[in-house]
Amino acid sequence: MNASQEPAPPGERPAFDYEAPPQGYELAHPSGPARTFFGRPFDLRGSSSRPWRRTVVVAVSTLAVILLLGGPLGLLWRWLAPSVPVIDAGQAGVVVNDPSPEEYIAADGWFTLLGLGFGLLVAIVAWLVLRRDRGPFLLLSVVLGTLGAGWLVAPWVGELAGRSDYERWIETAQQGATYAAPPEVHSLGPMLVPAFAAAIALTLMAGWSNDPDLDQPGAKPGYGPNSEQSPYGDHPPSEQPRV
């Protein structure tokens, strides 16, 4: 028995043994090493705190809600983006009534800004509201939802507003008549911004979280060698006495 294993006198803290891990550290798993997914425990059988049924329901519900929110996003973009002045040129058809129209760039710019805010807002709300469901499945549902909202739902709803009136004008317009055509999204980049913003926001919030496990509320700041859960007690390894 070395000095670190000798019983300590009453009232004194026993010396720390660096050769053996603290008791209770890295407990053996009855069925072998625990499975992990992105550093978190992963078991196909689920657990009492987060059953698989709840995980699937929350992920699908979150995806559906975010997709539906793409509708208001498209209407807001349609309201803010400028219309495009066009003219009926007769045999040439309907053309833009401006040699260098800025409305095209403005429409994409507004969609980019709104998509950025939409992705950040959705990520923050999901992180705060779905606290007990944080993890890779929440990240996947939020990213897929914002991708669908920004790529499919919002452009479709925004471009649909006023489209029927514009098509009716094209059918009845005389040569020289002008009209304010509804805006359109002309590039793919702005439609991917919501998903990109949501993924970055959720990843940063997970990295800055004090919770040792993201879905455990009440974690104390300073989790690590200086916390009550530390096997080193009140002193970090650098301050432990050597024997």
Image (spheres, rainbow, N blue to C red):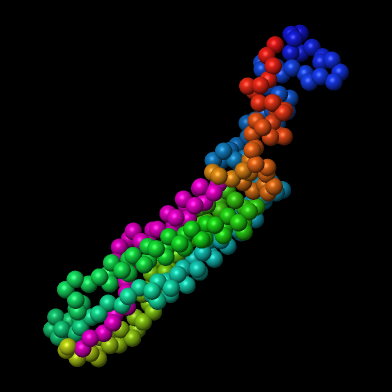
Q: Is 233 or 88 nearer to us in this picture?
A: 233
Q: Which of the image's four quarters has the C terminus?
A: top right
Span highlighted in magenta in the image: 177-206
The single residue placed furthest to the left in the displayed view is: 91
| Main secondary structure type of the part rendered in magenta | helix
- Can residue 157 be seen at all in this image of the molecule? no
Residue 33: x %, y % from top left: 63, 31
Q: Which image quadrant is residue 96 in?
A: bottom left
Q: Does residue 161 belong to the magenta stretch?
A: no
Does residue 80 appear to the left or right of 230 in the view shown? left
Task: Check the image and report above or below for 72 versus 174.
Answer: above
Quadrant including the N terminus: top right
Q: Residue at x 33, y 86 (%)?
A: 165
- The residue positioned 36% from the left and 82% from the top of the image is 162
Q: How many marks?
A: 0
Residue 110 in the image: above or below residue 216 = below
- Rendering coords of residue 156 (x, y %): 39, 72
